[in-house]
Amino acid sequence: MKASDLWRLAWRGLTRRRVRTFLTALGITVAVASMVIFLSLGEGIRKVFTSELGGIGPDIQVSLTPLSQGLALHPNLPQDTVKQLQALAPELGLQTVTPVVMAVRGGLDPTQSVVLYGLPASGGIGAVFPNTALAQGRLLLPADEQTGAAVVGAKAAQNLRLSLGSTLNLNRRASVKVVGVLAPQSGLVDNFIFMPLTPLQRSEGAEGRVSLVAVKLNDPRQARVVARSISDRLNLEAATQSDFLGFIERALRISDAVRFGISLIALIVGGLAVANTVMMGVFERTREFATLRAIGARPAFVRALVLTESLLLSLVGGVGGVLLGLVGIVIVNLYTQQLAGIDAAALTPRLTLLALGISFLLGLLSGLLPARNASRLSITDALGRV
């Protein structure tokens, strides 16, 4: 018998009980869709950092805290580190050395969460983010180091309803005035609020301390060698952009494993539903299978027929799950675009293959027991059943 005939028989067997088959396929669809949506978040964040980090930020960031312990934004690095790095600049090929203070402002509403990014007003935002462009107002000026000012990213301005001349409260005693709004650039920078270093240090109670030192190199290809030299000479942590991306990748792998574990519960339930549907089909069609055996069908054919039904049911659910997951991804991205200007979820080819592969494996495992039972039916006993 041709393979196409086998799949046709399997489809007829499933469509005899259409409601039961539909509900089972729907359960698998929802389970696979939930897995696709959960794992697409990791894929989307990978794409955001890979595409955007290469064009923004420092070649090397120097801090006290290693990346393995997470991203510590609290200012704990002595500001004298800047002078030490500047002394090494001619030897190591350091183009700019910029002290940075970072702080997060947020609340229960994620749209109100922003990153305050303090850096010397004399060097300007371009010292660390050279591709920034103004939409309104002006950039930071040296005079702002004492009086205070803020240049707001496009998405932060939208979410916090800030415009030129608006007052941004840092705490009960300190506030700054918005002097510029940046044009939309990337999902990361768009959520930053840039300020002169000194006012942000005062508001954070961190005079004489910084979160990190951002270093731009004359030759970015030497980043790893220079970072190693800085670490050895100053006994500090120096991380390159590739180190940061590696840290993000490891963190995302852990989160992927957690999300997959949550999805696995739904997948197991879906697999049990497939096994139950196919087993019921075997029980209801006992005489049919016995007749096939009586007219010459081998046990292997009956086993293949039942396995095909199980695989077909799971694959239909898997394809439906991918399509439903795609709809969910579009909804997630609509929200994250409004929130932060990024696509936080992405359906990649490897995620699609993973979803369909798991659906195939689910159908195979779910059909093994029913197929085994069907192939071992006693022809005489089965034909004698009413």
Image: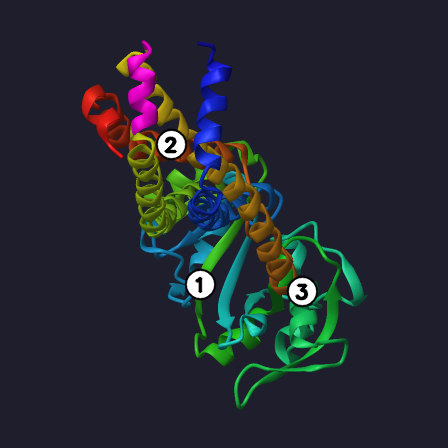
Q: Is 114 in front, or is 139?
A: 114
Crowd class of label 3 (few under 14; some 14 to 19; many from 20; radius 10 Å): many
Instruction: Please identify, in this view, whether the residue under mark 2 or under mark 3 is nearer the observer.
Output: 2
Q: Which residue is mark 1?
A: 211
Give coordinates of residue 162: x percent, y percent.
Answer: 70, 76
Q: Quadrant of residue 310?
A: top left
Question: Can residue 53 be seen in the rendering of this structure?
Answer: no
What span is colored magenta in the figure?
287-296
Residue at 64% of width from left, 66% of height from top?
121
Q: Looking at the image, is 139 positioned above or below residue 22?
A: below
Q: Does 296 appear above or below 137?
A: above
Q: Nearer the viewer, residue 191 or 74?
A: 191
Give the spatial CA distance, label 2 vs label 3: 49 Å
Helix, strand or loop at disc 1?
Answer: loop
Q: What amino acid does circle 1 point to?
A: Ser
- Of the residues shown, which amino acid type is indicated by label 2? Ser
Residue 53: x and y in percent read 56, 46
Q: Which residue is mark 2?
A: 310
Q: Is residue 128 left or right of residue 270?
A: right
Depth check: give the residue in front, 338 or 206. 338
Please tell me whether residue 292 belongs to the stretch shown in magenta: yes
The answer to whether 176 appears left or right of 289 in the picture is right
Is residue 328 rendered to the left or right of residue 240?
Answer: right
Separation (CA) of disc 3 from disc 1: 23 Å
Residue 314: % across, % down: 42, 36
